[in-house]
Image: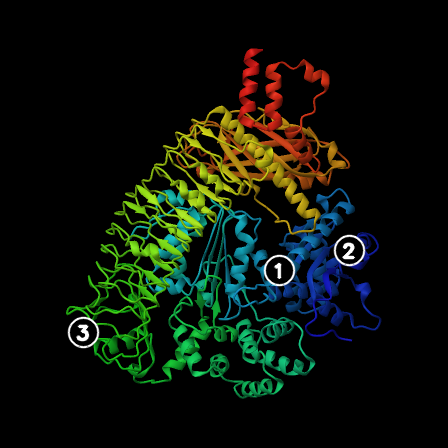
Amino acid sequence: MSEDASSPPPYEVFVSFRGPDVRHGFLSHLNVAFTQKNILAFVDDKLQRGDEISASLLGAIERSLMSLVIFSENYAFSRWCLDELVKIIDCKRENGQIVVPVFYHVDPSDVRNQRGSYGNALAELEEKYNLTKAQSWRSALAEAANLSGFHSSNFKNDAELIEEIIKCVLKTMNDLHQVNSKVYVGSDSKVLVGIDKRIAHLILLLDLESEGVRLIGIWGMGGIGKTTIAKEAFKRLHAKYHASCYLEEVSKKVERNEKESLKQELYSTLLEEDLKIEKTNELPKYAKIRLGRMKVLIILDDVRQVEHLQELVGDHKWFGSGSRIIVTTRDRHVLTNEADDIYEVGELDFDEAHRLFNLNAFKENHIKMEYNEVSKRMVNYAKGIPLVLEVLGGLVRGKDIDVWKSKLSKLEKILDKKLLNLLRLSYDDLDREEQKNFLDLGYYESDDSVLDGLERLKDKALITISEDKVISVHDIIREMAWEIVRQESIEEPENRSRLWDPKDIRKVLEKDKGSKSIRGITVHMSAIKKLNLSPDVFAKMSNLKFLDFHSEDYSDRVDLPQGLQPFPTELRYLRWMTYPLKFLPEKFSAENLVLFDLSYSRVEKLWLGVQDLVNLKDVKLHASIFLKELPDFSKATNLEVLDLRDCGWLTSVHPSIFTLEKLEKLYLSGCTSLTKLTIHTHLSSLQYLTLRGCHMLKEFSVTSENMIELDLGFTAINALPSSIGHQSKLEILRLAETCIESLPATIKNLTRLQYLDIMYCKDLRALPELPSSIEKLYASHCSSLKTILFPLTLAAQLKENRKIVEFWNCLKLDKHSRKAIGLNAQINMMKFAHQRHLSALEGNHVEDYEDYDAKVKYVYPGSSVPEWLEYRTTKDYVAINISSASHSPLLGFIFCFIIPKDTSRAFRVKLMITISDDERGEDEGFNIKFDVFRPLVGVASDHVFIAYDERCSRYLNSRAQNQTRFKILVKAVLPYKETKKRLGSYDVLVVLKGFGVSPINASAYFKFIQQMEFPVYTLNTLLSFNKWSWAAVIATTLCIPFLWFKIKDLIKKLQ
């Protein structure tokens, strides 16, 4: 009895094997392991009697989540085995099925190159079968042998090999099921159907373990899911890289002359600095050097021309080893000579398509029986294209069966017509007002401040709305909107409701052919030649609601020699970047405006007096460098965003702005003439305030109970207001390169603060107690910093959640502060290990960290390993004993390295750790690495680098039953690409001045707490204490680290 079409795959693993070689030995033990771990595996003894083996096998392969291929001595002598393999490789290519080879007593190179028994077998089979068939077998063998898998010669026995295979299968199943169960309850509440196989296939092509740089293309038709795959891949992979950047709609932005800003966004994001790209479009040399040391992930979405790809990443081989670039495109030609591999995204199979359609039509995966047949017929017409399935599902959602049949009848009539006609069914189902709104959005993407009544458009899958209210329209659907408008008047564009073609716009505007039919105009200024317009160019367009002349530079494309008459009063959306006049029209009215954008303009003043701006929500004047003053905004009671970045002549902000109760975002970075920003009222709605690069700003006092991010970096302020402590929702505080001398004590009241940047604050002398919520503290290059205060009790420090703490080149830190930083590292790392252990025991999801050096690390000046580490040495290895791991498993390790002074400006130190099974280190052992990213200005003294890691503990726990003593060896190098001391192709060795290790097991955390907070003293001991001993007891009992350090030093002196 066949399964229902929408049921999940019946098998998790398909096992391909040669029976006589492994059936009664290795495979039987593997099968037992599958049963013990509740893994549903397909092997040929599950075939029902009388089944045609070939048909059953092919169906089982198709419906399995992964395949395990056991290559044994005589595998290739079986035609059935080879046909299985061809089908498995087909499923890998088409559906992204995971394939794992096991080389059982055979050499992978023999399989890959068909040598030895594999060569003999293929030679025999070629005599019986045609060359085409044989070539398909050879190709499948070669592809499978190139995949990452298991080699029996790397394991002591079959038991170890089977154990690793089971771990691999369980991890793969866990990853796949996590993605399968992932539901997005955002703008569309949709399940990402079929994403697991597609991501798995992409990851195989990325070959994440290999060195070098790889560029992988994702190619397919519009609406097939390329962007969805890229976004999900970015979300799952970005944490594995030193830096990452996702750029959307690349070619569209390049065509709009945004090349420089796009490139600046890419490299500024990767380097985490405000990088300036010169007009030559060349990347600064120092930026290339830094990027060459970094492992980065770049995703470029929707690249339509190869030149656009080359302009952004050029010869991408100069990125750091291990970097990956993913490019999505509809045009395979873009990738032909650029990509290392191409993933052709195919349509969803019927089961996936049916599931996706049901989720959009019914908001669930199961349907009523009477809808089953008609839904399957609709799915057939969608051809497996996700976007079409979503549109069709939205079209019939909530309708009765008769409406479904009516819609299906229309579909059947347009079977041979273009996809645009199919998509138009959703448009025809809208009322007139909804159709107007949809066509507007087909031209003027925006946030939902411009248009109302969008829920129905979203329900029809014609638009998407992100969490931050940004509306998007898919290219296919936008093309449909363009075609609908073009059909309004094919020959006379002035009679259309909307204009977007540069030629049509030139014809209408320069010849004053405007009419009341025109509702909107949109064009990127780079696509149009210089326009010479009359002052009454818009006079006849009485219904004009949208005017969008957009650009990203100062290029002046419009001449208005006689000025400009007022805009139509119906205008709601005005975006005129590079507006050429110094002033707005004399009788300019902003009363109906919702969005007002004159970025990159020459305007010096806006309107005069007070206007009724109740509809206004978004004002952008970015880079209007001649703007001298702002008008009164007191009646803009719904204003949410005010962007004044890089308005270099603006000396003040109109006080009315600080009376606005709905203002959420105020951007003032780069306003270099601004000297103060102080208000006496308490803002209720402001969430984001940026003043970065306002070099003249000395006075600052702004508070908001809802502030989330405050950026005062690169300003001249020398103090924060004490009221900073009232901003209880603040999460990000940037103060880099300011003149502050101290932070107010009230900063500890910021209980949600997670990110604090005080780098290069050269006048800062002391750090007060900081809030326990901080995860990332960047305090490097504070050359005057001497003291740091930590909470007085262990209980208070245990509330902290520190992940990254950096004090590079803070050379004046006193020794008590340095020791306190080290102790704080111990406390936070012990707690981190304990929390992850508890989460795992409780069955909660625990993030699987790969690069721990990027997750939990401390660095500060110092020349010796802290005393609290269990194993300390000045050599390059330690011998450890983990006998306790047999009854209390290891959770993780704390590693400490003393990084020596180095002024060579080599950016990265690579730390490689090897754990050997015995102290002699005769076996290959287990290897991990840390990357230490040092300041480009060099390291002016020795530094202590402390990091947490779990990878070693997993390895040692698996061996703790048989062995308890291990050797841990560390090697530090400057990668040869990053130093002038290059010796051929070899890395330059760095001699560490100290090395320390502390294993953490499940019981260590509680012992640590007891030792720190509740010391045990006998009566005789207490009676023998002198006054200094009593002081030590009090200090340790209260857990005052910096006081205890002082007392210890004093005791030593007295002795």
Dot 1 crowding, Cα within 10 Å, few <14, some 14–19, many 20+: many
| Residues at marks 3 and 2, CA–CA distance in whole angstroms | 79 Å
Please state which of the two labelled residues, at mark 3 or mark 2, is closer to the viewer: 3
Compared across the picture, whether 618 is left or right of 165 comes to left
Specify the label residue 179 is tagged with. Answer: 1
Quadrant location of the C terminus in the rendered image: top right
Sequence-wise, the earlier of marks 1 and 2 is 2
- Expressed as whole percent of the image width and height from the top left, the position of residue 779 reads 44, 36
Which of the 4 image quadrants contains residue 548? Answer: bottom left
Sequence-wise, the earlier of marks 3 and 2 is 2
Q: Are marks 3 and 2 in contact (CB under 8 Å)?
A: no
Q: Are marks 1 and 2 in contact (CB under 8 Å)?
A: no
Which residue is painted at 59% across and 56% down in the image?
A: 204
Residue type, label 3? Ser
Residue type, label 2? Phe
Local SS, label 1: helix
Compared across the picture, whether 224 is left or right of 480 comes to right
- Expressed as whole percent of the image width and height from the top left, the position of residue 597 reads 31, 63
Which of the 4 image quadrants contains residue 886? Answer: top right
Specify the label residue 534 is tagged with. Answer: 3
Residue type, label 1? Val
Which of the 4 image quadrants contains residue 99? Answer: bottom right
Whether residue 931 is visible: yes
Local SS, label 2: helix
Dot 3 crowding, Cα within 10 Å, few <14, some 14–19, many 20+: some
- Between residue 50 and residue 174, name the one nearer to us: 174
Which residue is painted at 42% across and 77% down in the image?
A: 481
Local SS, label 3: loop
- For disc 2, the marked residue is 34
Above or below, 166 against 139 in this view is above
Quadrant location of the N terminus in the rendered image: bottom right
Above or below, 266 against 615 in this view is above
